[in-house]
Image: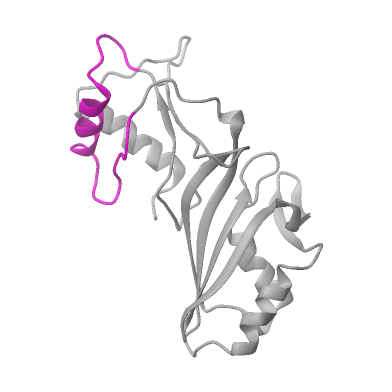
Amino acid sequence: VWISHLDLMRLFQRAFQRGGLRLKHSQGYNPRPLVSIALPLSVGVESHCELLDFDLEGECPSNEQICVLLNTSLVSGVRVLAVYDDGRKLKELTYLRCAVELEYDCGIDPSGVEAIRHLFAVPSLEVTKKGKNGPVEQDIIPMIRCLLLTRDDDYTLRIIAMVCCQNPSLNPMQLVAAIERYLPECKPDHAICRRLEIYDTNEQVFQ
């Protein structure tokens, strides 16, 4: 959760080295290891579905052995779920399923639950997004495939949503930003975001 994207890349590069797995490198004046992670993860966001692409030199162990070697070389809290060949092209990656927990220290007003449901049912909902040239207004409704709001207990609401993750992409924390902007009385004291799964255009699990 608290490892930046670049630090996570370095972590895996070192894990390959510790496990005796030699990564191929790019050609040129400044060779770089051929390893990359799709959809860079924001600091503070947990994930169960990251994709890491890599190429090895020489004779490669089996996928099961690579998984074991990496997991014995990684830190607690980061682990490889599976290793497989012939991954699909990343341009086919379309949707992301996420969970966002909204925590209220003093409890939830029941009227607030319906207000949040109504907020995400409107035809248009603009939220400020940081762009390369400064803040821009972004309508997030077209990027929400589906959204379910449930009440876990008197202090926690949970949003389960499937959102676009490429061309265009929606950061799930923008859902929290929308609540803070349009329903300040429903602003949570804490918000926890998790990536759960990623899908292709046909909503099949992406691999």
Tell me if residue 153 comes above or below residue 135 in the rendering: below
Question: Where is 171 relative to 117, above or below?
Answer: above
Q: Identify the residue at horizontal 55%, vertical 25% (top origin).
A: 89
| Magenta span of residues | 56-83
Q: Quadrant of residue 30?
A: top left
Of all residues shown, which one is farthest toward the right? 123
Q: In what quadrant of the picture does the N terminus appear?
A: bottom left
Residue at x 22%, y 18% (from the top left corner): 61
Residue 124 screen position, x and y as percent: 81, 62
Nearer to us in this view, 4 or 162? 162
| Total marks in image | 0
Task: Please say which color scheme the image uses.
Answer: one colour
Q: Is residue 59 magenta?
A: yes
User: Residue 104 appears at what percent x and percent y?
Assistant: 50, 82
State whether the magenta stretch is mostly helix, strand or loop: loop
- Compared with 157, 207 (above or below) is above
Instruction: Based on the picture, tell me whether residue 202 belongs to the magenta stretch.
Output: no
Q: Position of residue 181 (x, y in %)?
A: 71, 73
Residue 142 horizontal side relative to residue 87, left or right: right
Relative depth, front residue between 45 and 108:
108
Instruction: Left or right? Give the position of 171 relative to 55.
Output: right
Q: Residue 182's spot in the image, x, y percent?
A: 73, 75
